[in-house]
Image (cartoon, grey):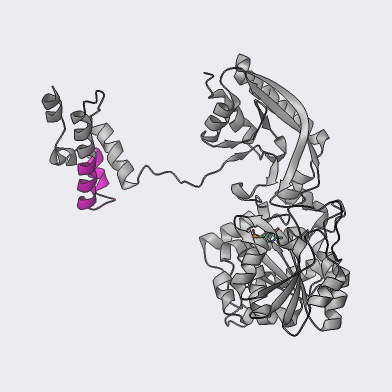
Amino acid sequence: MKRVRLKQIPSVSSLLTEPGFKALNELYSQERVVAAIRQVLAKKREQLLSGRENVVLTADALLQEVKAILGLAEQPNLKKVINATGIVLHTNLGRAPLSQRAIEEVTMAAGGYCNLEMNLASGKRGSRYEHVKSLLCRLTGAESALVVNNNAAAVMLCLSTLAKGREVVISRGELVEIGGSFRIPEVMEQSGACLKEVGATNKTHLKDYVKAIGEATALILKVHTSNYRMQGFTKSVEIKELVQLAAEQGLPVMEDLGSGILLDCTAFKDEPTVRSRVAEGVDILTFSGDKLLGGPQAGIILGKEKYLKRMQENPLLRALRIDKLSLAALEGTLLDYLNERLLAEKIPVWRMLQKGESELLPEAELLAGDLREVLQDKAEVEVVSGFSEAGGGSLPTVEFPTCLVKVKPLKGNEEGWANRLRQNAPPVLLRRQSGCLLLDPRTLLEGDRALLKAAFAGIEGE
Ligand SMILES: *Cc1c(COP(=O)(O)O)cnc(C)c1O
């Protein structure tokens, strides 16, 4: 029996005469096509010898497998997902979706040539850092600005330039880990600066800083504890006091703001805005492009020209430099900031964060209606109240009240449903809580509701 089946395996030469296989010759060399055919046929042979029943040997089926080996059937691994988690700046999902203007600028820069490092007025070589410098200064009041690959790179460049082989004074309460292996002490070590920790975990006083400052001190560093808050018996030194101390000692003071709010908003009372920090006289500030700014991955450095000039001359900058696509997206985002009043309409992150319950309730109800329609008796669907999160280690204590769609599976369990939805095309990411799935309309983008309806329609209860 096996022998009979083995004889049905077509030969390489006969397959090569089939039209589908012939067409492959237009894309690949004969050697690669033959090697792929051999690989597929060897697998078929093995399957037959191991006694497998339903081994398909038609030319069409074999062609599909050959194409898969050659990479023709490959789908991108990086794909759109639906973020129904309600976490606006979800680091695992790529943080901030870009504004329309930012997308247009990226598209321009991606598909053609641009004046990335060309001064069009003089016709001479220009600097990529110039494109957003005056815009950043205008928006924040800073003297100078420099942009790099991300905020981790920004911190690294600042420390390497200003404090290599010397000491950086920092409070023990601010030795933060951001996740994804960004730890302030480790970044400092890599930059060649020495950490001089002061104070206790919960309390640091001005006198602790004073005591630590000596001959070897290069910099006073403050790190915004962006992803947590200390409560209770705590004390940290205000940035104003540090600025004053640094001035007295003739040292620069730097602050890693993490998220960096560019808006002049007072809605988040614990969060310093970039403009207020510049006004308070901080010498160097760093923050991310893709957190609350709502732009692409980037690290933004603001501060006094005399320090930033030295950073521009640091050879490390070449390794940390921003690429043209991110730069284009950043400029697009910053241009949106010039129309302050329209920000909540233009920057998706701000649009999502500013949505109130009056807007979210009807959205949740529409989604709940769609899901009830396709799920019928497979699940109970209701709208409940809850909270969304800013995410990305930003605004950890700010609550964003929202309306959630709660789906309680009656067939199968919520874990199985969540797994299947995550493997849907496009994948759906949501929250799970005590036997239920929770979907937050706050982070849904245009067209997502229809895709969610289709994804749930495809679920089979077990
Ligand atoms: C997020 C964050 C970083 C890292 O920023 P990336 O842009 O992700 O490199 C560094 N410091 C603080 C305080 C942060 O919140």
Residue 213 vs 362, above or below: the answer is below
Q: Which of 407 and 354 is in front in this view?
A: 407
Where does ligand 1 appear, by image quarter? Answer: bottom right
Q: Main secondary structure of the magenta part?
A: helix
Front-lying residue, 50 or 198: 198
Q: Is residue 410 left or right of residue 278?
A: left
Residue 383, image x, y percentages:
75, 25
Q: Where is residue 196 in the image (x, y as percent from the top left)?
A: 72, 73
Question: Residue at the top extreme?
Answer: 377
Q: Which residue is drawn at 72% across and 49% down?
A: 349
Q: 357 above or below 280?
A: above
Find the magenta span and give its range.
20-39
User: In the image, what residue occupies the spot 54% across and 37% down?
Assistant: 426
Report how many numbered discs are placed on residues in the image: 0
Residue 336 seen: yes
- Image: 51 above or below 283: above
Tell me if 72 is positioned left or right of 390 in this view. left
Percent from the top left, x then y, of residue 157? 64, 73
Residue 161 percent location from the top left of the image: 65, 79
